[in-house]
Amino acid sequence: MPHRILLTRQIHPDAMDALARLGSVRLWPEPRPIPPNVLLAWIREADACLSMLTDRIDGKVLEAGAANLRIVSNMAVGFDNIDVSSASQKNILVTNTPDVLTEATAELTWALMLTTARRVISARESLLRGEWGDWAPDGFLGTELWGKTLGIVGWGRIGEAVARRASAFGMRVIVLENKSRGSKTDTLPLPEFLAQADVISLHVPLTPATRKMVDASWFQRMKPSAFVINTARGPVIDSAALLDALNAGHLAGAALDVFEQEPLPGDDPLATHPRVLATPHIGSATAETRRAMALRAVENIAAALSGRRPPDLVEPRGGGTA
Ligand code: DGY
């Protein structure tokens, strides 16, 4: 019998072709996430599952698949949507797609940083409203990044890639002390880090240790002129505390690509806040990267189905960097 592969979303055609060469593919064809009840039913008859970060692969889903399922291959570097401990208890492999999205995510981080610091969105919206009168010496004054300090939280691949671009923008880089990995740049403990950073950019995975890590106590100690950029995972920030801090003037602004609840409704207070730039989880959204992620996810399935160790095997984790 050919291998049975569950694919929860249409992916790049090259990856669809590669997957079809591995076995018979059952595709959820709609342009929205597979409903949980369909996932639960279809996983029973799958030897492999190529999942998205929007699919919740919890203990119940893994239990349903346990008789046949050999691998859950997530098309994302993050895998907080999967109960990895439960998978490993059932001998189901879990893989992610690291490396291939590093540069795309770093580029989006810089896009958000520059757009926020220079108030590009407000300026454009004002122009579209027909409000462009005379040039004004104090019109749309932003913050210059040149000469400022960029604080990186999470010195993994993406944090490093963001930091690598900083010298081109004349920024000094500091890194929040992280005992799990070294860095060549200045590593500071939290109080000094928060006191010095002009822009704080988050690059940690979502784990029990990082959930709501950025809370009211952080905002109270940041520079009131600081910006926070989040291209990691939404629940790393306590969003109620972020809104309070923005309204109390504890920080200048935030640019967020990820949220505690996704999708974020357009009328959510974070989406509409005048000092928040919100984008819909597009960190890895380049044509090149999404193709590479899809191919990498297929590669992991190919390895597992042929009895080899998949290149991107992940372990249950309690901390670390993306
Ligand atoms: C990931 O891969 O975890 C990213 O969030 C996708 O953009």
Image: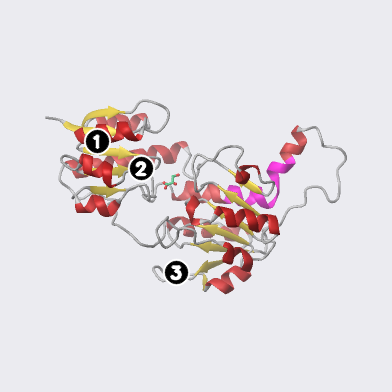
Amino acid type assigned to the residue bearing label 2 in the image: Arg
Q: Which residues are magenta?
A: 110-123
Q: Secondary structure at mark 2?
A: loop
Q: Looking at the figure, which quarter contains the C terminus?
A: bottom left
Q: For the view shown, which residue lies furthest in the top direction? A: 29
Q: Secondary structure at mark 1?
A: helix
Q: Which residue is mark 3?
A: 178
Query: Residue 112 colored magenta?
Result: yes
* Number of the label disc, if any, that sits on residue 56: 2
The dominant secondary structure in magenta is helix
Q: Where does residue 8 sit, x and y in percent of width and height?
A: 33, 33
| Label 1 packing within 10 angstroms: few (<14), some (14-19), many (20+) | many
Image marks 2 and 1: residues in contact by CB distance under 8 Å: no
> Viewer-proximal residue, 144 or 180?
180
Is residue 202 rendered to the left or right of residue 13?
Answer: right
Mark 1 close to ligand 1, CB under 8 Å: no
* Marks 3 and 2, the one that precedes in the sequence: 2
Amino acid type assigned to the residue bearing label 3 in the image: Asn
* Marks 3 and 1, the one that precedes in the sequence: 1
Whether residue 47 is visible? yes
Q: Quadrant of residue 205?
A: bottom left
Q: CA distance from mark 3 to mark 2?
A: 29 Å
Whether residue 300 is visible? no
Q: Which residue is mark 1?
A: 43
The residue sitting at 47% across, 49% down in the picture is 103
Query: Residue 218 colored magenta?
Result: no
Amino acid type assigned to the residue bearing label 1 in the image: Ile
Q: Looking at the figure, which quarter contains the N terminus?
A: top left
The residue sitting at 25% across, 52% down in the picture is 86
Image marks 3 and 1: residues in contact by CB distance under 8 Å: no
113 lies above or below 289: below
